[in-house]
Amino acid sequence: MKKTLTFFLTVLLTVVSATCLFAQSTFSVKYIGEASLNSFAPHSIKVEADYDRHTHIISPPNSYTQTTPVLESKHIANGSTVAYLLPPTSTAFQTYELFHLKVTWTAYQNGYLISRVHTFNDLQILSANSGNEIDLTIVGARIRLKAISSGSHVTYQITLQTF
């Protein structure tokens, strides 16, 4: 019985350790504004991230996962990167599920400042996580989303060009 339990715990910790190596545990958002022939790139954008943070505590026999829903908005200047989810400070490890990225910016239309909004949904984010670049032309702008992975960290790069 003791050998079986020891073997089971060894396998469990090995699987958890391997999962930690490949799981996305932190993310940030980078903004790149591109000028067009008719307009300048917006100086900054506001990005609202809707995600669940999963904190995994591994301490047999009481291992568990705690899920915390998060809705977080940050302003990002052109060329800058802002962290949304940082590594945990404890011995736990974390993963996340990103549901949407809502991008808001200000643009001129017929001489008036107006607010524009585009939301990348969960399917578009999953596609970006798989290596695809989401490239959309919407009213007055072209907006792109690309996920750049580096170990367990992902940077979601948003490129915006207004017309």
Image: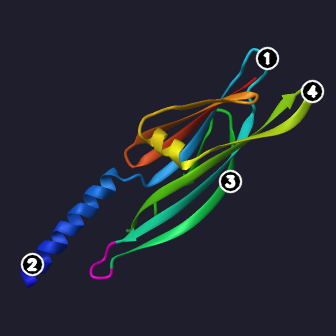
- Where disc 4 sits, the SS reads loop
Residue drawn 61% across and 47% down? 101
Looking at the picture, tell me which residue is in the foreground, 72 or 81.
Answer: 72
Looking at the picture, tell me which residue is in the foreground, 26 or 102.
Answer: 102
Indicate whether 128 appears above or below 18: above
Residue drawn 41% across and 52% down? 24
Q: Which amino acid does the dot numbered 4 rest on?
A: Gly
Dot 1 crowding, Cα within 10 Å, few <14, some 14–19, many 20+: few
- Where disc 3 sits, the SS reads strand
Q: Find the magenta span and give its range.
A: 58-62
Q: Residue 150 placed where, x, y %?
A: 40, 41
Instruction: Give the spatial CA distance, label 1 vs label 3.
Output: 29 Å
Residue on which the image places disc 2 = 4
Residue on which the image places disc 4 = 111
Q: Which amino acid does the dot numbered 2 rest on?
A: Thr
Residue drawn 50% across and 49% down? 27
